[in-house]
Amino acid sequence: DAKTTQPPSMDCAEGRAANLPCNHSTISGNEYVYWYRQIHSQGPQYIIHGLKNNETNEMASLIITEDRKSSTLILPHATLRDTAVYYCIVRVAPGTYKYIFGTGTRLKVLA
Amino acid sequence: GAVVSQHPSWVICKSGTSVKIECRSLDFQATTMFWYRQFPKQSLMLMATSNEGSKATYEQGVEKDKFLINHASLTLSTLTVTSAHPEDSSFYICSARDPGTGIHNEQFFGPGTRLTVL
């Protein structure tokens, strides 16, 4: 079973920030949180990952709570091309490389 | 990021035939690759872990004799769907871990192969 839960869908106005939450209450101390997105009929695209500090790259920011039980992916200025399913993933177990995908959040950016 | 390709991007076959899908890491050597299956409007489901030079590890419920995986080199893994039936129609996606740049074990995904069995 996936170790993460996400809302099934969200809408966001174009140009506004999109904040996508994820709960991972059973995450262990040395497990990273990964975010990917999947645009229709394509393979998932890596966005960002983090352990406990907030992270930022050219695509997004990742905010991880102090207790590491939840995180938020922020797309600062959403565009129509950001419409996709966003997956938050924690590895199955420390020391393995397997991902188990949850249901993800379907983000729709509205013009 | 690292680049992973798949071939073919789509395939249509008759029921009872076998189909081979290739997954290649283009600019890195992947000791570990993964195969996923995705049905319409559903999430990705991990089928198996492909390890270079050894047998694949299949997830529970995935028939290893039906979904043959070969990882003969550090840049190529193949998935063969044997005796395909319409219920095998799906989107098959591979991923690879780059032990060099993927130091935090992020996986890089191929573009997927859409299989339609008539």
Image (cartoon, coloured by chain):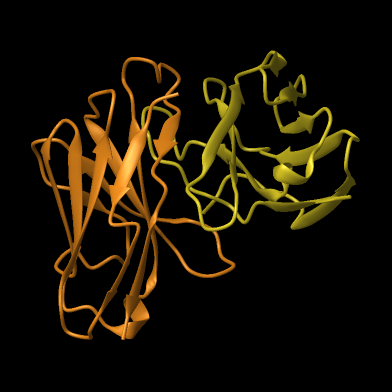
Chain colours: A yellow, B orange
* Image height of A101 relative to B3, above or below: below
- Side of B50 where B112 appears, left or right: right
Q: Which residue is drawn at the image coordinates 84% and 30% (left, top)?
A: A77
* Image height of A43 relative to B60, above or below: above
Q: Which residue is drawn at the image coordinates 57% and 21% (left, top)?
A: A29
- Side of B52 where B25 appears, left or right: right
Q: Position of residue A78 (x, y in %)?
A: 81, 36
The quarter holding residue B100 reads top left
* Image height of B4 relative to B55, above or below: above
- Side of A71 where B114 appears, left or right: left
Q: Position of residue A39 (x, y in %)?
A: 60, 50
Q: Nearer the viewer, residue B107 or A69?
A: B107
Q: How many marks?
A: 0
The quarter holding residue A36 reads top right
- Side of B115 where A102 appears, left or right: right
Q: Position of residue B95 (x, y in %)?
A: 36, 41
Q: Position of residue B102 (x, y in %)?
A: 40, 20
Q: Dividing the image into 4 quarters, which one contains the N terminus of chain B? A: top left
Q: Which residue is drawn at the image coordinates 70% and 25% (left, top)?
A: A68
Q: Nearer the viewer, residue A102 or B89?
A: B89
Q: Which residue is drawn at the image coordinates 73% and 23% (left, top)?
A: A61
Q: Dividing the image into 4 quarters, which one contains the C terminus of chain B? A: bottom left
* Image height of B12 relative to B114, above or below: below
